[in-house]
Image: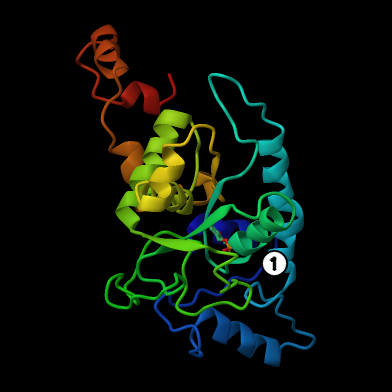
Amino acid sequence: MSLEKEALLRALGAEVIRTPTEAAWDSPESHIGVAQKLQREIPYGIILDQYKNINNPLAHEFTTGPEIIAAVEGTPSTSSRPSSGKIDVMVAGAGTGGTVTGISRAIKKKHNKECIVVGVDPKGSILALPNDLNADGEGSMYIVEGIGYDFVPDVLSRDPKDVNTWIKTGDDESFAAVQQLMRKEGLLVGGSSGSALSGALRWLKTNAGRQVAESEGKNVVVLLPDGIRNYMSKSWFLNIAMESEPSPLAGTIKQILGSSKPNGVALQNGH
Ligand SMILES: Cc1ncc(COP(=O)(O)O)c(C=O)c1O
């Protein structure tokens, strides 16, 4: 968990206990094991339990899903941007799986039962079906936060009618996609949003995906769940932000200010 998330929770008055990421979910050292111990010992302790709580997928079925459906239905089809008026493909990362499960139910029950729902799972996690233990490095560590687990939460539907297919993503492609989203779209998103975009682009190159990509007016919705402000101290982001190629303006600025000023000084000081 990033420093930003810890600081925010502490600012709200929370106690934060850090547990080792590598601890197996069912070990006493894991975040779940520690929470259970604390619940047993603290009078009236309660675990809201995002992994089992049916209100997790329900929140997405009754809020996130309808919001996406309204946005797509409310966007008119034009000659330059033709639209089927439907969500034809929905791509979302899975952590607890509440998001992808709930949105899928909203879309399929009330909007388009033919929608193809693609779950995105990081390499190192075991959520994707079918689990190919050899191909995807299950159990290996990954840096992207918020998606993937070493167990299958109850709120993640295993019904292939809910989540039709899965794509595995790696850290590097996710962070590269975040950089593209920032540079090209001005969207300041977190790492799992990069995984969702990278997974979507890769799925669109599969046989089923190409049929969608090559048909006019198909709508592919990619969920970008978190902003970069939760991850600004992370080295993957600092590498993107501080070590990126100089912009086309860099040379001009150097000319104006003279070469005596080292790179970046004027901007860093805000002058
Ligand atoms: C950054 C980020 N991305 C994706 C997810 C996945 O959402 P879900 O747990 O509903 O599968 C989460 C969940 O907390 C998250 O924090």
Question: Is 100 in front, or is 246?
Answer: 100
Q: Which residue is mark 1?
A: 56
- Note whether 22 is above or below 172 in the view shown: below
Quadrant containing the C terminus in the rendered view = top left
Q: Which of the 4 quarters of the picture holds residue 33?
A: bottom right
Question: Is 246 in front, or is 209?
Answer: 209
Q: Which of the 4 quarters of the picture holds residue 52?
A: bottom right
- Name the residue at 57% across, 82% down: 32
- Note whether 195 is above or below 46 in the view shown: above
Query: How crowded is the residue under tag 1: few (<14 C-alpha within 10 Å), some, or many (20+)?
Result: many
- Note whether 47 is above or below 14 in the view shown: below
Side of 236 relative to 40 (left or right):
left
- Name the residue at 69% across, 67% down: 56
Helix, strand or loop at mark 1: helix
**Dot 1 beta carbon under 8 Å from ligand 1:** yes
Question: Is 249 in front, or is 192?
Answer: 192
